[in-house]
Amino acid sequence: MDFIGLPSPDAAVLAGAVLVGLALDLAFGEPPARVHPVVAMGHYLGAAGRRVSRPVGDVVRPMVEFWRGALGWYVGAALVVAVAVAAVWVVQDLHPLVQAGLLGLLLKPMFSWRMLRDEVGAVEAALAESLDAGRQRVGWLVSRDVTVLSESQVREAAVSTLAENLNDSVVAPLFWFAVAGLPGAALYRFANTADAMWGYEGERGGRDWTWAGKWAAWVDDVLSWLPARLTALLIALQSWGRGWSAVVANAGLTPSPNGGWPMGALAVGLGIRLGKPGVYELNARGRAPLAADTAQALRRCGQVVVMLSVVAAVVVVAGGLV
């Protein structure tokens, strides 16, 4: 497809870039922070956020705050897409194999499987030392109060994060890369980062985001809608689709319109309970997760990455790129 008039690489080149990106992720993990584009997005969102949000205690002006937030989001999104379009323009006339390699290098920072896998595994390793160590480590992954969590609740938080971020950090960026090339993946990563930093109901860091963050939260919900359901399907396929009706029933139990899909699929597939105290409980009749369930959850999510790799490899071969 064309992206605002710019010729997009063909499917085989895009699929080759996915394979290169996945290989780089598994081999090296994340780029250094000083050259990581998502870190740069975060710097912009941090600076712009201080201008679009309202200090706690100031007079509430709902529409002013909302449109400030929307405008700040659009300015950042335009910058991100412009950089991505420029990068595609630079490589568009190169040999398809070179295009695939360079696009894969540029795509890699837009998704992250290795870091997600390692961080969830680190929570389980910390739990093996002590409950306090597990609580401290899971605090790196979630924003809730971890000081009162039981061992099973620490594990539930880690596995829930794994499932939700399998979509946010892997499947969705690759989905939008397949749909709209590098600009699509970059736009999704910006939207997801903006939601993480701005999409709060109420106070965060001394500022009120109730209205200023609404646009960022809504856009992320829209862009994640289809990928979240695709992620749930890919997880459920490993059980041959058994329990899909239970996945659908559980998906609507979370405040997020999307998070319940991959989390529910993993909970049902493993026969475990996943919950956030006072907020939601998925597969409520399931058992409390054990250490072996974390390992199994990591394997199942890893299999989703393998499935995506196989699809990309088939497209590469069918397109005659190799």
Image: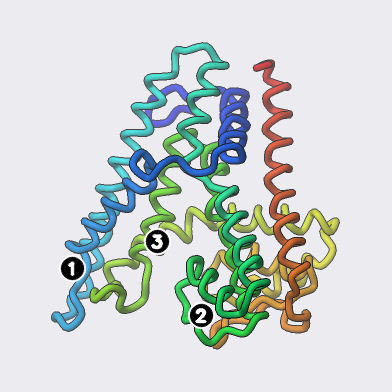
Q: Residue 58, position in %: x, y? A: 14, 80
- Tell me the mark number nearer the camera, choosing from 1 and 2: 2
> Which part of the image, by quadrant, shows the C terminus?
top right
Instruction: Indicate which disc, 1 or 2, sits on the residue closer to the N terminus.
Output: 1
> In this rendering, does residue 30 appear at all?
yes
Q: Residue 294, position in %: x, y? A: 71, 65
Left or right of 46? Residue 127 is: right
> Do the residues under discs 2 and 3 have CB atoms within 8 angstroms?
no
The amino acid at mark 1 is: Val
Q: Quadrant of residue 133?
A: bottom right
Q: Is residue 256 above or below residue 94?
A: below
Q: Which residue is mark 2?
A: 146
The amino acid at mark 3 is: Asp
Q: Which residue is mark 1?
A: 64
Q: Quadrant of residue 251?
A: bottom right
Nearest the eye: 34 or 251: 34
Circle 3: element type: helix
Q: Is residue 106 above or below residue 165?
A: above
* Residue at mark 2 to residue at mark 3: CA–CA distance: 22 Å
* Residue at mark 1 to residue at mark 3: CA–CA distance: 19 Å
Q: Residue at x 64, y 57 (%)?
A: 229
> Do the residues under discs 1 and 2 have CB atoms within 8 angstroms?
no
Q: Is residue 193 above or below residue 287?
A: above
Q: Which residue is mark 3?
A: 195
